[in-house]
Amino acid sequence: MDARAVPAVGDRRLVLLLTAFITVFWGLNWPAMKVAVAELGPLFFRTVNIYVAACGLFLLVRLSGERLRPQPGELRRLFPVALVIVGGWHLFTGLGLTLIEGGRAAIVAYTMPVWAAIAGRFVLGERLGWRVAVALLLGLCGVLVLVWPDLGRLGDRPLGAALILAAAISWGLGSVMLKAGRWSLDVLALTGWQLVLGGTVVVAAWLLADPVPDLAHLTWRGVVGTLYASTIALVLCYAAFIKMVTLLPPTIVGISILATPVVGLYSSALLLGEPAGWRELAALALVLPAIALVLLRR
C-alpha cells in the first residue's frame, strides 16, 4: 500500500475525529497511569487494565449485536499479533518504567512511528513519500524537544531504556502485522480478543515477578486512575486506534498520535502540578503540522 494514499472524504473526516479523540484521552491517561501505578505496581496495574477493558469491549459487542465469535483459525492467526502489540507494549513499558522515569521513557517510546515505517516498508511494501518523511521528522523532533533535558541521562539506566525501546518496536511491528492480516471481526471484538490473547504474557509476568499489592492502601485517586486507564484509554481509545489502522497505513497512524505526549504533559501539569512551559508549545508547533501533512489534502 502506498503510504501517501489519501482516504475518501467520509473516512478522512472520521480519521480526523479519531485522531483528536485519541490524542486528548490517551494524553489524559498519562497522569491517570502515574497515580495508579504508584499504588498498584506496574504489572498488576497492567493486568487489571487489560482484562477489565476486554470485558468492557465484549459487553459492547453483545449490546451492539455484532458477532463476537471469530472464524475457525482466526484466533490462531491473531495470537502472534496480540502478543506483539498488546503483550509486548504493556509488558516492556511496565517493567521499563520501574527502572527509568516517565520523561526519559517517552524519548524511546514515541519512536513508534519509526519502527512502524521500517516494518511497513518491508512487510507491506509501503513507499515512504516526502510528506510522510517530513511528517515523521517533525513529529519526532517535537517529542525530542519535550524531553531534551533528560536525553543525556538515558545511559544511567541502559536496561530500562532497552525495555522501553522493545515496547516501541513491539507497537510499531504489531501495527504492521495487524494491517497485514485479514480479519472477519468488527473493530470492538477484534480489539477485545487482542487484549485477551496478548494479556496472557502480562499476567504470567505479574504472577512470576510482581508482588500482590496491598489494596487496603488504595486511595480514591488510584481507583479513578485505574478505572480511567481500563475503560476510556483501553476500551474506547484502543478501539479507535484499531479503527484507524484499518483506514490508514501504520506509519501514518503512528505519526497521527504523536501529539499525545503534549496533551499528557499539559494534563499532568494541571492535575499533578508538574512543570510545563515553552518546550510544550514548541513541540505542539512541530507535531500539529506533522499530523496535517499526512491527514489533510494539499
Image (cartoon, helix red, strand yellow):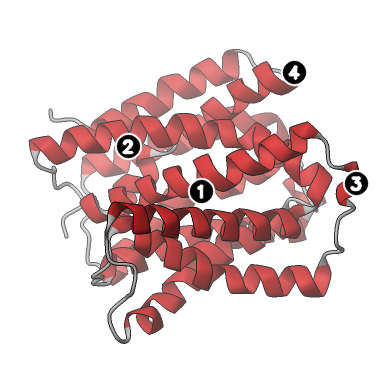
How many residues crowd mark 1 within 10 Å: few (<14), some (14–19), many (20+)? many
Mark 2–mark 3 distance (CA, rounded to whole Å): 38 Å
The disc labelled 2 sits on which kind of residue?
Leu
How many residues crowd mark 4 within 10 Å: few (<14), some (14–19), many (20+)? few
Q: Which mark is residue 216?
A: 3
The numbered mark, 2 or 3, whose residue comes first in the sequence reads: 2
Where is residue 275? Give x, y as percent: 71, 18
The disc labelled 4 sits on which kind of residue?
Gly
User: Which numbered disc, 4 or 2, marks the residue closer to the eye?
Assistant: 2
Camera-side residue of 210 and 188: 188
Q: Secondary structure at mark 3?
A: helix
Instruction: State which quarter of the image contains the N terminus.
Output: bottom left
Up the image or down, 295 lies above or below 275; here it is below
Q: Secondary structure at mark 1?
A: helix
Instruction: Write down the quadrant of residue 212 in the picture.
Output: bottom right
Camera-side residue of 148 and 184: 184
The numbered mark, 4 or 1, whose residue comes first in the sequence reads: 1
The numbered mark, 3 or 1, whose residue comes first in the sequence reads: 3
**Which residue lies at the image location 39% right of the left edge and 50% below the top edge?**
239
Q: Secondary structure at mark 2?
A: helix
Q: Which residue is mark 4?
A: 273
Mark 3–mark 1 distance (CA, rounded to whole Å): 25 Å
Q: Which residue is mark 1?
A: 234
Task: Kindly check if marks 3 and 1 are in contact, taking CB atoms under 8 A apart as contact.
Answer: no
